[in-house]
Image (cartoon, rainbow, N blue to C red):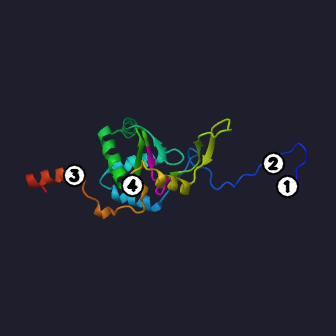
Amino acid sequence: MVNLPDGYRASVEPPVTSDGFLGEDFVMDSQEFLCWLSDYYRDDIVTLRLIIRMMGIQKPGGTVEATHSRLAELLKVKQSQISRSLKDTGTLGVTAKIKAGLYQLHPRLSLRGGRVPVEPKPGMRTQGTLKVDQLSLLDAIEDNPKLPEVFKELRQLPKPSEKPLREDKVRAQARAEEDGTS
C-alpha cells in the first residue's frame, strides 16, 4: 500500500512493451501461417493479397468490416474474385463470415490487439471496453453455434503440396491438353 499526501493521486500502468509501429497499430501473426500463406497461395495472388489486406485492416479482435465491393475496390480486382477468395479461405477455416460485410480472421493465425467495446451492463452509464484476449476469443469461437465447424476447429492448415488446382486452372489445363499445347 502506498500512502500519498493529501491532494495527490497516482496511477499504475503496465510497462510499455512495444512502440513505434507505423500508424501506431500492430498485429500479431503466426510465423507458420505467414510461411504457409506464401506457399499455399503462390499461384493465387488475389487470395494472397486479400488475406494480407484483411490482416492489415482488421479491427481489435480480428474482425474485418468490409463488403465484397469495398475489398474489390481496395485490391483493384473484380467482386467475383473476392467472392471466390473468401469462399476458399472460409472453406479452410482461415476466415469466417459473421454477417454481410463482417468477417473474422482466425485468432490462431492473425490477431490485432487493443480494446473492443462491450455492451453496458445494468448500472453502467456508458459503454465500456475490454482488452482483447486471444484465449477468450478462442473460447467464444468454440461456443458460437453460428460459426462453421472448420473455423471453430482450426488446429492445422493443409499442406501446400496437397492443394488442389483452382477450377479455372483445371479448365485452362484441360483446354491446353485438348489443343495439344501442354
Number of other residues with Cα within 10 Å of mark 1, as a class: few under 14, some 14 to 19, many 20 or more:
few
Badge 1 element: loop
Rendered image quadrant of residue 135: bottom right
Q: Is residue 177 above or below residue 102?
A: below
What residue is disc 4 on? Answer: 149
State the residue at coordinates (32%, 42%): 83
In the image, 9 versus 31, the foreground residue is 9
For discs 2 and 3, the disc positioned in front in the rendered view: 2
Number of other residues with Cα within 10 Å of mark 4, as a class: few under 14, some 14 to 19, many 20 or more:
some
Badge 2 element: loop
**Left or right of residue 107: residue 174:** left
Q: Answer whether labels 1 and 2 touch (C-beta < 8 Å).
A: yes
Q: Which mark is residue 2?
A: 1
Residue 1 locus on image (x, y percent): 84, 57
- Magenta stretch: includes residue 157: no
Badge 4 element: helix
What residue is disc 2 on? Answer: 10
In the image, 46 versus 67, the foreground residue is 67
For discs 1 and 3, the disc positioned in front in the rendered view: 1
State the residue at coordinates (55%, 50%): 26
What residue is disc 3 on? Answer: 169
Rendered image quadrant of residue 180: bottom left
Q: What residue span does the magenta drawing correspond to?
A: 103-110
Q: Do we see residue 46 in this rendering?
A: no
Q: Which mark is residue 112?
A: none
Q: Amino acid at mark 2?
A: Ala
For discs 3 and 4, the disc positioned in front in the rendered view: 4
Number of other residues with Cα within 10 Å of mark 2, as a class: few under 14, some 14 to 19, many 20 or more:
few
